[in-house]
Image: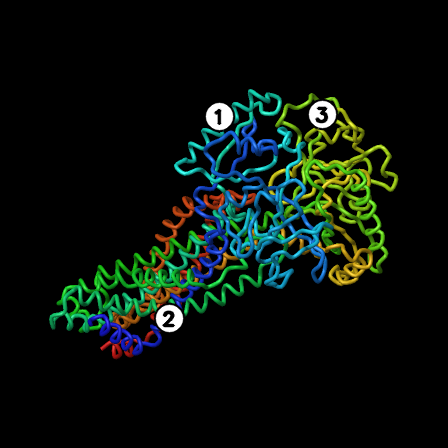
């Protein structure tokens, strides 16, 4: 009964002060809307279900070598973990596989995975339609079958109900679609959209030295993670005794299964969530200041209600209800604002095969968002209204009547509360400004790093090729692909407007890394697990010229480096410095194997370092081989074309030329190299922009809080100001006295904020490049920025006070 009356009374009270109501609602809407939009993103990227049963029981089985570095497991380890352990109810193995899909509107490249018999059993994942794999799919002579993802079903097959049992052409082989997974399902990354049986060969099952895979397992009932690790450790020791050459120093590791590729994004997203919560708190404290100031103005009303018998609890409930009404209105407006902010955020993200935030496209204001909005609204209402309500309801009756009767200022307790809220707002703003400043400077450092090539006027065209099975070494197939790429390159290079054309297997700043094991001539043969694993790239002779990569020594590839000729390689500057310091690397030899028995490849040149997946640190050693002599990882090959024109103008003609060359050739992505370069910094740019926006919003709200408090103080002290000026006080002195309080509170908040920033900015360490998390210059800039804005916010109402006409001020106050 009281609640409904309080709500009606609160609405009427707010309607009588539309200015106060609009400012309070808009302030909360900004905080709630920004928070809600980010919560929706985090829900989609990190929190939403992946379609697994009891995910807490899922673990990943990997390994470490004797030096403690990640080493993975070998294909031959898989059946051992299935047959010789009791901690796991099901064990599955997967590996990456690319497919070319023929039969849709145009050929397309699909990232998929080969999976073992019990992979889906271990995950506990159920299909939306059809079934997952059974023993029959792995039997000798069984026909090829495939399970596809929901997105692929929708985009390539139009969501056709008759998809189960349909035959599709993958890598030139007919596969029968036996199942469609649910929309939420993903395995490692949403880019993987098709799964086929991994039918191990005898050679694969006998391989124990070539590690690089992880296993997925479901722990048996009653088994703890520590128990599973202990059994894996015991198996490792047993294998070391049985196969000392392959397992010396290697130990299996059992960890919680990382279902989402975005798990490494958790620290950054948590940092952004903390920042937007700070913004929401500043908004709430701002509204609390407004509520407190308005409550003081209503001192006579509150005193009369108390004199008429209203209890302290009843008065506090009424005031808190009014704050909750403001919060509900702010929450409703924030929900609408969140929809707009989310749409703007999604529209600004770069598109690509590997999104910078997996599943961010699934962000939406659904039931989870509505619950979050409700929780944020209730929390905001409590933060805004609880302390003012308790403070105002506890004022002594005679004080309230005396202050209210003469329109006086707030009592000492209320003044301390107003000051405390300003201090907290200033502290939170400094923390946000310091974090944003660190990210801005870090991002500037990233942009200042030279990538090692010239991105202007270069068009890139991904022309993927089906991946050869593990251990498959079909020389005839490799030679066919080499010739095919050469013919395609020749066809495209004849187009008007192209000054140079080349092919490369791994594009700089892309999302794919290919590594190879080598043995340097004259060096001791490494032990198992300690082989030299280096970044590998196959390139055509014109690649370095087209990309503008500097040739530092020797030569690059020529047309004479053909099949049958002595095999040659070009190495990066970092590789030359690491393996042949103080020597001339040209003429050195190595083999693409760990046995050290050849055939030998001769280094003929050294080129400048090229940045790939990160700008920080020394670029890793890299080997380039001539793709006509050695072609590995052809599934990620890319054409690079230099043109004096805008590269985007050539996209259509290049597509058409490739279609004429081979109608069945998929084209995965067409981008200018400048776009690739921009996309490579999209993630740090996104974090920097978002945190900077939050910091700017927090600074704006803090300034608004200071302005509103000083303006209110001026309005409440009009009588006093009139008397002082009538007695001869100088306007400047009056202005300074009005500003002094705000600046003292801001200074106190700055000190607290800098201490908090020192403690909290360590969270940013993983996102920073070339700058310390406690950089003094950045912290000083944050303090100066807040001080400048606070000075302006306090000066404007103080100047108004200094310009008051004493006679008018006394008359209005009276």
Q: Residue at x 70, y 53 (%)?
A: 169
* Residue at mark 2 to residue at mark 3: CA–CA distance: 74 Å
Give SS at disc 3. Answer: loop
Q: Give yes or no for contact between labels 3 and 1 (Cβ–Cβ under 8 Å).
A: no
Mark 2 or 1: the one toward you: 1
**Which quadrant of the figure contains the C terminus?**
bottom left
Q: Which residue is mark 2?
A: 23
Q: Is residue 299 visible?
A: yes
Give the mark nearer the N terminus: 2 vs 1: 2
Place residue 250 in its image quadrant: top right
**Which badge, 2 or 3, comes first in the chain's sequence?**
2
- The tally of labels here is 3
- Give 5 or 22, whichever is nearer the viewer: 5
Crowd around label 2: few <14 · some 14–19 · many ≥20 (10 Å): some
Select label 3 or label 1 by which is in front: 1
Residue plotted at (54% across, 35% down): 62
According to the image, label 3 marks what residue?
A: 595
């Amino acid at each position: 009964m009281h609640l409904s009356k309080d709500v009606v009374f609160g609405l009427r009270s707010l309607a009588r002060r539309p200015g106060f109501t609009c400012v309070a609602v808009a302030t909360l809407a900004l905080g709630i809307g920004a928070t809600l939009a980010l919560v929706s993103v985090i829900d989609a990227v990190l929190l939403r279900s992946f379609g697994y049963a009891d995910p807490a029981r899922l673990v990943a089985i990997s390994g470490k070598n004797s030096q403690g570095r990640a080493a993975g497991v070998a294909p031959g380890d898989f059946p051992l973990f299935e047959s010789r352990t009791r901690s796991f109810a099901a064990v599955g193995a997967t590996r990456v596989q690319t497919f070319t899909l023929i039969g849709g509107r145009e050929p397309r490249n699909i990232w998929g995975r080969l999976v073992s018999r019990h992979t889906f059993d271990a995950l506990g994942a159920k299909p939306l339609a059809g079934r997952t794999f059974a023993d029959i799919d792995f039997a000798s002579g069984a026909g090829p079958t495939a399970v596809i993802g929901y997105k692929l079903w929708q985009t390539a097959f139009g969501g056709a109900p008759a998809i189960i049992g349909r035959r599709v052409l993958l890598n030139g082989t007919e596969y029968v679609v036996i199942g469609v997974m649910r929309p939420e399902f993903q395995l490692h990354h949403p880019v993987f959209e098709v799964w086929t049986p991994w039918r191990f060969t005898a050679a694969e099952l006998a391989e124990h030295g070539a590690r690089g895979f992880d296993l997925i397992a479901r722990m048996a009932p009653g088994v703890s993670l520590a128990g599973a690790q202990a059994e894996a450790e015991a198996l490792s020791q047993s294998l070391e005794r049985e196969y000392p050459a392959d397992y010396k120093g290697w130990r299996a590791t059992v960890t919680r299964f990382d279902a989402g590729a975005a798990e490494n994004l958790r620290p950054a997203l948590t940092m952004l969530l903390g920042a937007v919560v700070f913004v929401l708190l500043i908004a709430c404290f701002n509204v609390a200041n407004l509520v407190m100031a308005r409550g003081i103005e209503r001192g006579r009303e509150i005193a009369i209600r108390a004199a008429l018998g209203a209890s302290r609890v009843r008065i506090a409930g009424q005031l808190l209800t009014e704050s909750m009404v403001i919060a509900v209105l702010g929450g409703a407006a924030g929900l609408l604002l969140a929809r707009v902010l989310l749409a703007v955020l999604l529209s600004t993200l770069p598109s690509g095969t590997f999104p910078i935030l997996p599943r961010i496209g699934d962000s939406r204001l659904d039931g989870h968002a509505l619950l979050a909005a409700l929780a944020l609204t209730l929390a905001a209402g409590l933060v805004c209204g609880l302390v003012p309500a308790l403070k105002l309801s506890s004022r002594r009756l005679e004080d309230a009547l005396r202050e209210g009767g003469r329109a006086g200022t707030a009592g000492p307790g209320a003044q301390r509360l107003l000051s405390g809220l300003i201090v907290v707002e200033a502290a939170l703003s400094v923390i946000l400004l310091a974090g944003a400043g660190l990210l801005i400077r870090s991002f500037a450092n990233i942009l200042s790093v030279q990538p090692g090539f010239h991105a202007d006027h270069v068009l890139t065209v991904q022309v993927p090729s089906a991946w050869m099975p593990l251990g498959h070494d079909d020389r005839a197939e490799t030679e066919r692909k080499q010739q095919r790429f050469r013919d395609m390159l020749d066809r495209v290079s004849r187009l008007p407007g192209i000054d140079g054309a080349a092919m490369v297997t791994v594009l700089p700043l892309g999302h794919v890394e290919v590594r190879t094991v080598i043995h340097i001539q004259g060096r001791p043969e490494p032990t198992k697990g300690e082989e030299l694993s280096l970044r590998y790239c196959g390139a055509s002779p014109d690649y370095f010229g087209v990309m503008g990569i500097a040739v530092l020594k020797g030569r690059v590839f020529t047309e004479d480096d053909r099949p049958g000729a002595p095999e040659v390689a070009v190495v990066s500057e970092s590789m030359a410095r690491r393996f042949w310091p103080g020597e001339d690397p040209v003429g050195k030899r190595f083999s693409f194997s760990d046995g050290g028995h050849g055939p030998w490849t001769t280094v003929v040149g050294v080129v400048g370092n090229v940045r790939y997946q990160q700008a920080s640190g020394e670029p890793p050693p890299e080997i380039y081989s001539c793709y006509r002599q050695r072609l590995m990882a052809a599934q990620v090959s890319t054409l690079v074309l230099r043109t004096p024109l805008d590269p985007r103008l050539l996209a259509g003609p290049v597509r058409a030329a490739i279609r004429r060359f081979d109608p069945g050739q998929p084209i995965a992505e067409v981008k200018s190299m400048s776009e690739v370069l921009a996309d490579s910094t999209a993630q740090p740019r996104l974090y920097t922009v978002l945190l900077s926006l939050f910091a700017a919003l927090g600074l704006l709200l803090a300034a608004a809080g200071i302005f509103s408090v000083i303006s209110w103080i001026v309005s409440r002290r009009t009588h006093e100001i009139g008397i002082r000026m009538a007695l001869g006080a100088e306007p400047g002195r009056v202005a300074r006295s009005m500003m002094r309080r705000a600046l003292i509170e801001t200074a106190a908040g700055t000190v607290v904020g800098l201490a908090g920033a020192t403690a909290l900015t360590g969270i940013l360490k993983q996102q920073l490049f070339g700058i310390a998390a406690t950089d003094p210059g950045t912290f000083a800039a944050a303090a100066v920025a807040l001080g400048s804005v606070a000075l302006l916010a306090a000066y404007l109402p103080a100047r108004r006070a200094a310009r008051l006409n004493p006679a008018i001020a006394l008359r209005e106050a009276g």
